[in-house]
Amino acid sequence: MPELPEVETIARNLRDGSAGCFALPGLTISGFNLSWYKTLVEPPAEVLQQLLPGQVVKDVTRRAKYLVITLSRHTILIHLRMSGDLLTFADDIDPGLKHIRFELEFLEGGRLIFNDPRKFGRIWVVEDTQTLLGKLGPEPLDESFTEGEFFNLLHNKKRMIKSLLLDQSFISGLGNIYTDESLHLAGIHPLTNSTSLTLYTSRKLLESIRQVLMDGILRNGSSIDWVYRGGEYQNNFRVYRRTGQACNVCGTMIERIVVGQRGTHLCPKCQVLY
Ligand SMILES: [Zn+2]
C-alpha cells in the first residue's frame, strides 16, 4: 500500500507537473467520468455533476496517506489504498489502462485518471475535510510536532510500538515498510511496549522516522508489488522484505515475525527486546 513518501511523490508530480504528469493547479474542471460506482464515496454522482464543473484546482497536497486536491469551493480527497494510481493524459493519447475507475476532465484539455486494479481506492468530494482528516494523528515531518509531544503520546498509550506506529490516529502516514525501516534505524524491537521507551529512545525513534521518510521522498518512494511506479527506495531497504539476508549494520540474518497480523522485519541483534 502506498505510504507517506509515495503519496507525497504523487502529490508533488501533480502539483509541479513532473514525472510525466502535467500540473493541475490553475486548471478548470469541465466534467468527470465514474466507471466503478464504489470508488466515489460522497457525494452521489448526480450531485457531483452539479458541483464539480467550473471549479478551479488551487493546489495538490497530501495529508497522511490522502491525496488532497483543493478546488475553488470543494476539496477532493483520494485514498489510493492497495493499488490506486493517478496519472495525467492529453486528450488525444490512449492511456492504455485497463482499470480506470474515475476521470477528471479539464476545460483546457487533458484529464486526470484514477487507475485502480483492485478497486479498494476511494474518492470523497467534500466542503469540510475535517470529518475525514480531523481524526488523523500528527504529521511526522511537521516541524511543530516536537520530541516532547511524541514522548507524551507514546506514554499515553500502552501498546506495542509497531502496532502503534501503524495506527493513523496516533501518527500519520506510516505503513508496514517505513515502520519496519524506522524501527531498525532506531534500534528498537517492534514488540517493545510504547511506555518503556525513554526520552532518549523516543527522540531517536522520531529522528529515525523522519530520516526514513525523507529518504523515501528523496527517492520518489518505493516501487514494489503494487502499481506505484518510479520510486527507488526499495533498493535502500534495511530490513523490509530482506528476511534471511545480512543486516547491513551487523551482518546478522534479518528475521520476519508477525505483529498484529502484519509481517514484520527486524535484525535480532540491532533490535533487542528489553
Ligand atoms: Zn543488525
Image: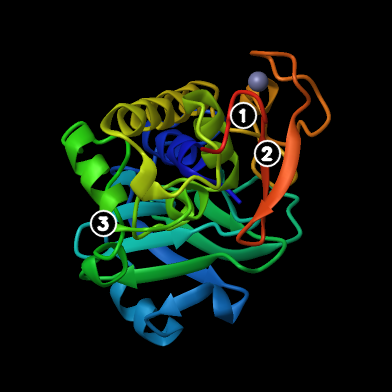
Residue 75: where, in percent of width, then height? Answer: 28, 62
Q: Earlier in the sequence, mark 1 or mark 2?
A: 1
Mark 2 C-beta to ligand 1 under 8 Å: no
Q: Determine crowd level at label 2: few under 14, some 14-19, many 20+ residues with C-alpha closer than 10 A.
A: many
Q: Amino acid at mark 2?
A: His
Going from N to C along the chain, the mark reached first, 3 or 1, is: 3
Q: Which mark is residue 265?
A: 2
Badge 1: how crowded within 10 Å, few (<14), some, or many (20+)? Answer: some
Q: Which residue is mark 1?
A: 231
**Residue 86 versus residue 130 in the image, above or below:** above
Q: CA distance from mark 3 to mark 2?
A: 26 Å
User: Hey, what amino acid is under mark 3?
Assistant: Asn
Q: Earlier in the sequence, mark 3 or mark 2?
A: 3
Looking at the image, is 260 positioned above or below residue 7?
Answer: below
Is 211 left or right of 63, judged from the image as shown? right
Q: Are marks 3 and 1 in contact (CB under 8 Å)?
A: no
The three-letter code of the residue at mark 1 reads Gly
Describe the element under mark 3 as helix, strand or loop. Answer: helix
C-beta proximity under 8 Å, tags 3 and 2: no
Residue identifier under label 3: 156
**Quadrant holding ligand 1?**
top right
Task: Tell me if I can see residue 226 in this picture.
Answer: no
Q: Residue at image x 34%, y 55%?
A: 170
78 shown above or below 20: below
